[in-house]
Amino acid sequence: MALMADEHAPESESPQPPPLPDALLDPRPVILVIAAVWLIAAVLAFTVAALHEWRPFTIAGLGIGVFGTSVFLWQRHAVRRGARGAQSGLR
């Protein structure tokens, strides 16, 4: 079996993948869609009698979503103000 010439190329010469488009880097649409789904599930759990067992799960989902969104907004605020320990990649 013959070896390819590229197998011995140094790491610095390997091609770099192109950067992701801004639409894929923005987490806001994902956060909004998931929050909307949890909100719809909570409304259904409290309006449809057959779904009464969903109530604690939907409330927990909404609460965790609010907590996660607040952490995201806190990190994004730290990035914008230039905090040294802030997460990178948030806009």
Image (spheres, grey):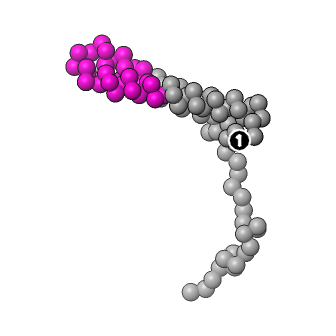
Which quarter of the rendered picture does the N terminus lie within? bottom right
Q: Residue 2 versus residue 8: which sits nearer the camera?
A: 8
Which residue is situated farthest in the bottom direction here? Answer: 1
Is there any visible trace of residue 22 in the rendered image? no
The answer to whether 17 appears left or right of 61 in the picture is right
Q: Residues within 10 Å of mark 1 (few under 14, many from 20)?
A: few
- In magenta, the rendered stretch is 37-65
The answer to whether 41 appears left or right of 21 in the picture is left
Tell me where residue 53 sits by quadrant. Answer: top left
At x 53%, y 31%, the residue is 68
| Amino acid type assigned to the residue bearing label 1 in the image | Gly
Q: Residue 7 versus residue 1: which sits nearer the camera?
A: 7
- Which residue is label 1 attached to? 85
Residue 42: image location, x then y, percent: 37, 20
At x 63%, y 83%, the residue is 3
Is there any visible trace of residue 1 in the rendered image? yes
Q: Residue 61 versus residue 23: which sits nearer the camera?
A: 61
At x 72%, y 35%, the residue is 79
Residue 72: image location, x then y, percent: 60, 32
Residue 48: image location, x then y, percent: 27, 15
Q: Residue 90 versus residue 14: which sits nearer the camera?
A: 90
* Circle 1 SS class: loop
- Whether residue 32 is situated above or below residue 27 in the rendered picture: above
The answer to whether 46 appears left or right of 89 in the picture is left
Which residue is situated farthest in the top direction here? Answer: 47
Main secondary structure along the magenta-highlighted residues:
helix
